[in-house]
Image (cartoon, rainbow, N blue to C red):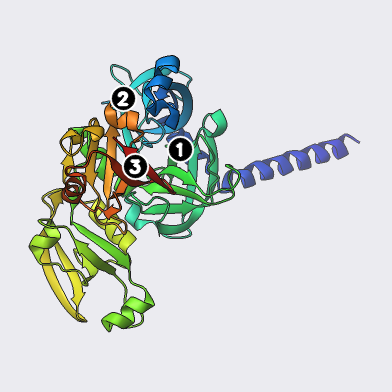
Amino acid sequence: MNKIIAAVGAAAIFTISAAVSAQATLPSFAPVIRNASPAVVNIAVRGTVAAPRHPFFDDPDFRRFFGQPRDREFRSAGSGVIVDARNGYIVTNAHVVKNASEITITLVDDVELKAEVVGSDERSDVAVLRVKDAKLPAEMHLADSSRLQVGDFVIAIGNPFGLQHTVTSGIVSALGRTGLSRDGVEDFIQTDAAINPGNSGGALVGLDGNLVGINSAILSGSGGNIGIGFAIPSNLVRSVMEQLIETGQVNRGQLGVMTLSLTPDFRRSLGLAENAQGALVSQVVEGSAADRAGIEPGDVITTVRGEPVRSNAELRKTIGMLKVGDSIEVGLLREGKPRTVTAVLREAAQIADASAIHPALAGAELVEVSEDTAGGVRVREVAQGSPAAQAGLLADDRIVAVNRQRVNSLAELREAAKDQATLLVQLKRGSQVILLPLR
């Protein structure tokens, strides 16, 4: 009887040992997550935004009785990634910290620290924060995202719905996605790793534990994950981050062209092959880098620095990663024949205060938009309480026409507003087209 019990006991020990051995050989993300998680932080934001403006507030009598609309306080949350523990730098999304007056980060061990914005770039949706005089536990190395391939395994780490350090996994579903934002510099990594509200600014990590992207957006009808998430590739993050740390802003070079998609009709009209790809130049801004290089309307831009340009969105992305003063070789087709020109990228024309154009625009910071299909003049910032703010202009509005006259540059805006007491401004706000009277 004792021999039987001993035999059974030995068999049980052998079974358990075999199970432990098998478990040890199974693939696991645990070592990667153990090393990467301490570099991911939770971000809590407090701030104020301008209250929605009603047309009644244009009436002085109405304002006398009811006063000006009050700013609205808000709280939001997101994620961030420590990229330089010694100097306290953290990367996140620009939309996570927009309008923030107070930022608190929470480390993996629940330690809370105050952070400040070093710089923010809305076009790429990248922001850099800094924590001063505090020891951060870890940092994450930025990988070379150009080496990513569709099908690579990736891990998303963040704080969805406030659930700190949630980990999900998936694969790279696609690369080079564009079209999520009209004005954005886009080159998104698409992944099916679950990304939800609160993941914004968190890490997309490769199996080596390095950062391949910053989670930024999801495609969803309900606001929750449906398996289509987007991350900003680390190479774009690195380019923007370095400029923000150095100067506090991104000084992008501008080629100075408006472009159209190269449709089959355009290909036939231009005598191009049916499979020809590129960005069709519809307008060249006077005095721009493109103008000085000899680029003309009707040219089809096919390469930049030897890299193919397959669409106007790809041209915008490529130019958006370059700096003022960069010299680039531009390959193009003119009347069906290939040509190469050299352009030195210039700074976008901008005005810190547009009061000289029209008194109602006082307090608005304006910048020209190029490398785009729509053109126009973008409202970069609006000072609180300024005439522009009181008139209803908001940051990121795009002015496309004044008094029914199309404007594609600051010079055209100035000419359209000249000697006009009232401006009927047509602008694009997100997907909306708005008519706004300025007096």
Q: Residue at x 33, y 71 (%)?
A: 262
Q: Which mark is residue 200?
A: 1
Residue identified by numbered label 3: 397
Q: Let me know if residue 399 appears in the view.
A: yes
Within 10 Å of the Cα at label 1, are there few (<14), some (14-19), or many (20+) other Cα atoms? Answer: many
Q: Which residue is mark 2?
A: 384
Task: Decide which of tag 3 and tag 1 comes sooner along the chain.
Answer: 1
Q: Looking at the figure, which quarter contains the C terminus?
A: top left
Check disc 1 and report its element: helix, strand or loop. loop
- The vertical placement of 246 against 323, above or below, is above
Label 1 to label 2: alpha-carbon separation: 27 Å
Q: Secondary structure at mark 3?
A: loop
| Amino acid type shown at disc 1 | Ser
Q: Position of residue 354 (x, y in %)?
A: 20, 36
Residue occupying the point 20% across, 67% down: 306
Calculate the distance from the C-alpha at mark 2 to the C-alpha at mark 3.
15 Å
Local crowd at mark 2 within 10 Å, few (<14), some, or many (≥20)?
some
- Look at 20% across and 69% down and name the residue there: 297
Look at label 2 and name its amino acid. Gln
Pointer 3: residues within 10 angstroms few (<14), some, or many (20+)? many
